[in-house]
Image (cartoon, coloured by chain):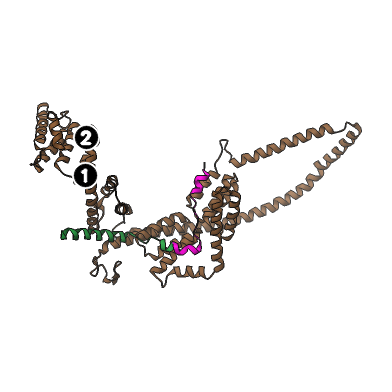
Chain colours: A brown, B green
Amino acid sequence: MIMICPKCKHKLPADTMVCDNCGANLEVYEKLYRLSRAYYDQGLYAARSGNISLAKAMLVKSLEMDKSFIDARNLLGLCYFRTGAIVDAISQWVISKHFADEGNRAGFYMDNLQGNPTMLNDLDNAIKRYNKALSAARSGNEDTAILNLKRALSYNPDFVDALNLLALLYIKHKKKSRAERYLRHVLQLDAGNATALNYMKEVRRVTSDGRLEEDKSKEIEEDASKSIEEFKKFKLDEDKPNVMAWLNLLIGAIIGMAVMFVLVIPTIEFGRTKNTAVEATIDYSTEIKVKDSMISSLEDKVELVEKQKEEAERKLKEMDDSKVDLTVYEDYFNALSEYLELQKMVEPSSKDYQTVAKKLTSVDLTKIEDKSAVKAFKSMQDNVLSMAAEPMFKEGKEELDDGNYDKAAELLQQSVDYGYITDRSLYNLAKAYQNLGKAKKAVKYFDMVVEKFPDSDLVDYAKGRADTLRDDAAGTGEGEDSDAEGTGEESGEESAEN
Amino acid sequence: MINFEEELKKYHPSLEVDQAADKIYANDMTDFSDILDKILKDKKKGSDDYDMS
């Protein structure tokens, strides 16, 4: 079997670890390849489940690992196309074709688009209308915006941004049922669309008496119309003439009508109602049958998706190097990204170095098997730590002079750990511990000054302080919790340090 | 409660079809293998400079 070096495209025997042409370490590329496929599987699963937002996120990560992964790029283009982001879809397919011109599904998608100029024109018009609508909404012309958005959706009914914006405008105008209709459409296209889910919560917000807000406004309207009717009736009563004969005739007519209504019309109505009820029963039965078949079909789909999910999980488990721990590699590559950002800065501050240093030291290199990757990382780490160490020492010294011994000890310890080992850094660290009552640590670092820097002007002071602490510890029998502090010749020390 | 003005800021104009070329050229084609190559090159350059000095 033959494999191809991903860097120089040289042909190599299978299972080769280092390319004999360009010297690239193929183990690392293999890891990236596997990570890319793992993210792609997750993206594919999400797309099949209708969660396009999640699918896009996973596919973007897959391409960050391996930009030449055609399937991921094509699928990402499809996801963009699904939600109306046509230009994003086209750009992904064009780039995909750049990597592989022959036998690439992206060619089919592009031919489909180019072969249907009407559709392409409609999609473009939808975008133009959407942009106009957005501009109008920002200028406060919301009615114009709504009209343009409706026009946009007539060109492309699946344009998610337009649907969301229209829903937002309807929410603002308190037309929540209309907004809900558009939001439902969005969620049918993309079940995980965060904007639509957020708006849907707003639309379905229930008031304190347990009813939807729009129900309340309807009720208010109904009450208002009733009171108007009452007012009208009162006025008519006032205007009616007081004639008894006519009143008797009227009463007789009313009784006759009452007999009609009580005996005749109900019989007719009963017949009609019965027919209506029978028809309704038939309608409902038909509807139930339709829904039953839909449920059955959905159940089949769920079963199929479950099987696909199990298959995908099984495939992931079978992958070599017994589980690709995405979290470990995520930390590793996140730290790499931060390092590169630091390199791009014109004049990074000491704080920038410290932030990146913290990120780099938090990565657990023991979980990364590839030695060359670990080596490269350590080299980068050394570079950043050495830049961060001296500013940390200066900050720690200032804290020490201000009497903030806790903070001083933390900063000075970090600067020493990062490699800033001088007589002054060790001496000040020891002083900080001494002021905190940590005699053992203080003695340790005073002794280090004497041992590592025998010609330093701080040696005598270090010896003196260490001896005092030892004597105090021996005399009181206390160790770490001793309250012993430095004594005497402070002014002499200060000038020696400076 | 949704703040209309804040939500509106989240929407951006969509690129039209004739602007697709700009989008393609602006695409950042860096992936992690490129980052790794750069780090190893920088490291090698650093050690070469050290050797020369």
Name the outermost residue toward the top. A476
Q: Secondary structure at mark 1?
A: helix
Q: Is residue A305 left or right of residue A129?
A: left
Amino acid found under the numbered disc labelled 1:
Glu
Q: Is A458 or A367 nearer to us in this picture?
A: A458
Is residue A97 positioned above or below A427 on the image?
Answer: below
**x and y percentages locating residue A185 in the rendered image:** 55, 54
* Quarter holding residue A240: top right
Residue A393 magenta-highlighted = no
Q: Is A167 or A312 nearer to us in this picture?
A: A167
Q: Residues within 10 Å of mark 1 (few under 14, many from 20)?
A: many
Amino acid found under the numbered disc labelled 2:
Leu
N-terminal-most mark, 1 or 2: 1
Query: What residue is shown at x 61% (from left), y 53% (from top)?
Result: A147
* Quarter holding residue A118: bottom right
**x and y percentages locating residue A463 in the rendered image:** 9, 35
Q: Chain of mark 1?
A: A
**x and y percentages locating residue A102 in the rendered image:** 41, 73
Question: What count of labels does the image hold?
Answer: 2
Q: Chain of mark 2?
A: A
Report the residue marked by disc 1.
A390
Report the residue marked by disc 2.
A400
Query: Which residues, given as a range, are shown in magenta?
Result: B1-22
